[in-house]
Structures are given as structure tokens and as C-alpha cells.
Image (tube, rainbow, N blue to C red):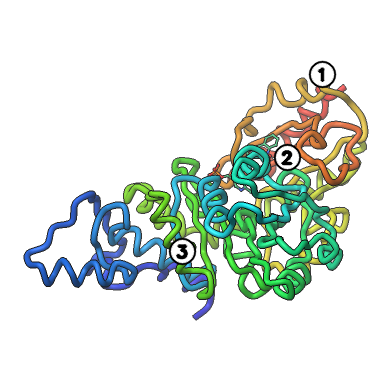
Amino acid sequence: MKQDTKIINAGRSAKWTNGVVNPPITRASTVVFNSVAEMNNAVANRHNQTMVYGRRGTTTAFAFSEAMTELEGGAGCALYPSGTAAITNAILAFVKQGDHVLMVDSAYEPTRDYCEKILTKMGVATTYYDPMIGAGIEALIQDNTVLVFLESPGSITMEVQDVPTISAIAHQHDCIVMLDNTWGAGINFKPFDYGVDVSVQAATKYIVGHSDVMLGTATAVEKYWPQLRDYSYLMGQCTSPDDLYLALRGIRTLGIRLKQHQQSAIKVAQWLQQRPEVAKILHPAFESCPGHEFFKRDFNGSNGLFSFVFNCGNKAALTAFLDGLHHFKMGYSWGGFESLILGITNVNSIRSATTFDCEFPLIRLHIGLEDVDDLIDDLSKGFERYN
Ligand SMILES: Cc1ncc(COP(=O)(O)O)c(CNNC(=O)CNC(=O)c2ccccc2[N+](=O)[O-])c1O
């Protein structure tokens, strides 16, 4: 079955839909049973898509989890109230006091905060590594290293990592490979084809696709799925069937949305490349982006999120650029149908192992589904104010 057909069918087994097209919203805390045997059978099958109690999920959760594993691969998908909860709980499932974690230096800032403020309290040490380290990761692996965390491309600076090389070396040292695959969305990057053991996504972004649900997913290979699932339950992680209904709805247009985001973003990036004020385009599909060669080798496509660096200007100029835009709104997210913009002048304040070459302001764009000429016109007027 081709990907676009999988997207339409994922999670729509008759056992969940019972004849209707979309898996219905099944809300529950209590699930009741008519006999001791029925109750015992449900408990015995608690890991086999059988309803026992709301916290373990209802048929809506079973349908969405199944859809994620059908699309991204893996043996099972645990659900969390946000992408950050997915990251933190997935890591927590596999570390204990005295362990060591390797964390990519270009990680999403709250991921770094978790390592600094919570893992350290638990006695888990973190070493940050250069996203472009590749095979050099081996020199950083210690006897107590248990997990290597990747985020590719990296937040804000968009470095594409050599995932299969890092995964192969990590596995030679019995380390778990965990990837924040939010940008790849399980469609443009198939994590388990490249050695990843646990793929985490902020479904908040492209999976939901409409900026109206907070949701996280962690999908694991067979070897690690039981432990991830059990720790998710132990930590009381559960999600709203109403949110999952919206996420299932989001999945149905994921393929065509990503194609449109990709098409418009590349057109905007090509236009930006010609601007005299632009020093570098940080879009994985462009040679100027670190790891572009890995994007070409490993990815099936791109989306609406990329950054660019100015070769001039300052905070005041950046503010003038940002204020007054009509179609680009400032907001701390991405992956919805709307265009967003973030102006950043301190990218190295969220790195510790490497320094990103960024003397002038950086802008991260999320190119939405608006007409791309309107978006370019909006940015063009921004450049007129940038001085
Ligand atoms: C790759 C990735 N992975 C996980 C999450 C968290 O998902 P959640 O929002 O559902 O918890 C996210 C959420 N993304 N949110 C943003 O990118 C918002 N921007 C920022 O936080 C931001 C702003 C200024 C400077 C640096 C950052 N940053 O992303 O690190 C993510 O991008």
C-alpha cells in the first residue's frame, strides 16, 4: 500500500469505527464489566487494545496509536499530553541514577532544560554533542552511556544529522537511540529504517496540523516497546479522546498538507536566497544547510519550517521587520495551516557544546497554506523596514 493510501486508512480498522468512517470519540474513566471472568479477561488483555480503565486509553486512543505505528512504523505508540511530555517521559523510561545521556546540542530548548533541571536531580549526567558529529559520537560514549538523543533537523538552526551512522555506533555500545522526529512527521523521515529505537513527535505540530491540540507520541521498536508502554502508564500519562479525534482527523490531510507546505517553503526560500540582506538559508533541501547531504539521502521530503540568517542588522531592525507583518504571526509553535515567524538574536544561548556562526539576527519561518505570493509580498515589506 502506498503512503497516501496508508494515511487515509491508518487507524480505521472496523474494530474502532464500527461502520462509521472516523473512529468515534470514546470518553471514559470507568469501564464496567458484567462478570468476574470478563473483568479478569480485560486485565489480562490490558496491553492488547482492550479497555480496562480510562487512563489506559479507550478505543479512540487505540485507533490513534495504531495509526501512528502504521505510518511511522514501530511496535507500539505511547501517547502524552504534549510533545515535551513525550520527550521527557520517553527518556525517563530508560534512565536511572548513575546513567549518562548524549544529547544533541541543537535540541529544542525545553529538552535541554529537562536534562539540566530534572535529569541532574536524578543523578543522570548529560553530555551535549555537535549535531554534525557523525561517527565522532563514539568518542563521547562512556561505560555508563545508555541513551543517545537526536533531533534532526535541529530546532532553529536546522542541522540534519547522520542518523544511521550515529545509530549504528550507539548500538555497538548497547545504547538506545531516541529521535525527536517532529519535523519528519513520520512521513518524510522513517526513523526505524535508519536505526532509531524510539521516535518521539510533538503531534501538536504537523500531525494535528491545525494549531488546536497539544499532543505527544513516542513510538518504539519491539525491543523497547513494553518498557516505554509500562513507564507511560506508571507516570499516569493519558490523553483526551477529543484531542485524539482531532489528531486522527489531522492525519487524513497530512500528506497533502506537507506537500503544499514544502512547495511554498521552497519558493519562499529561493526568493530569500536572492535578497542582499540574507547570508544563509537554513532549509534542509538547500546546500547551505548543514547536513543537506543527509537530507537528500534519508528524507522523502520537507515541510514549511526553515530558518535564514541575515548578514546585517540588529535587534531594532529585526523588531521593525517583525512588527507590521500581516500574514506571518509571531507564535511559539509551527505545523499548523497558518504562517508563523520567530526572530532570534541569541541562538547560542541555547547551545553549550558548539557555537553556531550567527553574528546577525536569525529568523525561523513556518510557511503555511496561504497563497505563497502573499507571503513573499509580506516578507518583502518586512525587508523594507529592516534597517
Ligand atoms: C522539535 C520539537 N520537539 C518538541 C516540541 C515540544 O512540543 P510541545 O509544544 O507539544 O510540548 C517542539 C515545540 N516547538 N515549539 C517551538 O518551536 C517554539 N519555539 C521555541 O520554543 C523557541 C523560541 C525561541 C528560541 C528557541 C526556541 N526553541 O524552539 O528552542 C518542537 O519544536
- Mark 1 Cα within 10 Å, few/some/many (few <14, many 20+)? few
> Of helix, strand and loop, which one carries label 1?
helix
Q: Residue at x 71, y 61 (%)?
A: 145
> Of helix, strand and loop, which one carries label 2?
strand
Are circles 3 and 2 on residues that touch, CB within 8 Å? no
Residue 71's disc number: none
> Of helix, strand and loop, which one carries label 3?
strand
Q: Residue furthest bottom?
A: 1
- Mark 2 Cα within 10 Å, few/some/many (few <14, many 20+)? many
Badge 2 residue CB within 8 Å of ligand 1: yes
Question: Upstream in the sequence, badge 3 or badge 2?
Answer: 3
Question: Upstream in the sequence, badge 2 or badge 1?
Answer: 1
Residue 340, image x, y percentages = 63, 37
Depth order, front residue of 257/69 = 69
Q: Residue at x 69, y 42 (%)?
A: 373
Q: Which circle, 3 or 2, is nearer the viewer?
A: 3
- Mark 3 Cα within 10 Å, few/some/many (few <14, many 20+)? many
Badge 3 residue CB within 8 Å of ligand 1: no
The residue that label 3 is drawn on is 77
Residue 316's disc number: 1
Depth order, front residue of 310/189 = 189
Residue 364's disc number: 2
